[in-house]
Image (cartoon, helix red, strand yellow):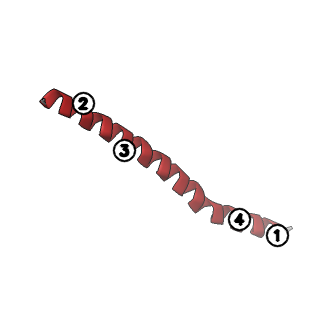
Amino acid sequence: FYKLYTSIALNDIESIPLIILRYVDKSLTLIKYVIYNTYDMINGLMW
């Protein structure tokens, strides 16, 4: 039982970075989108 639990825990630990990377990637995409839109809006106001 302990061995099984340990292997599950290790699998979870190994998958955590992937989950974090996926989350960060989505966040960065959203941030880029917001920045580009804001930039376009500022340019629109400037000219």
Q: How dense is the environment of label 2, judged by Cα within 10 Å: few (below 14), some, or many (20 and up)?
A: few
Q: What kind of residue is marked 4?
A: Asn
Which residue corresponds to mark 1? 2
Rendered residue at 64%/66% (across/down): 14
Q: Position of residue 27 (x, y in %)?
A: 45, 46
Q: Secondary structure at mark 2?
A: helix
Which residue corresponds to mark 3? 32
Q: How dense is the environment of label 1, judged by Cα within 10 Å: few (below 14), some, or many (20 and up)?
A: few
Q: Position of residue 32 (x, y in %)?
A: 36, 44
Viewer-nearest of labels 4 and 2?
A: 2
Is 8 displayed left or right of 20 in the figure? right
Is 20 displayed left or right of 7 in the figure? left
Identify the mark nearer the N-term, 4 or 1. Answer: 1
Quarter of the rendering containing residue 35: top left
Comparing 28 with 15, the one in front is: 28
Identify the mark nearer the N-term, 1 or 2. Answer: 1
Tell me: residue 27, above or below residue 41.
below
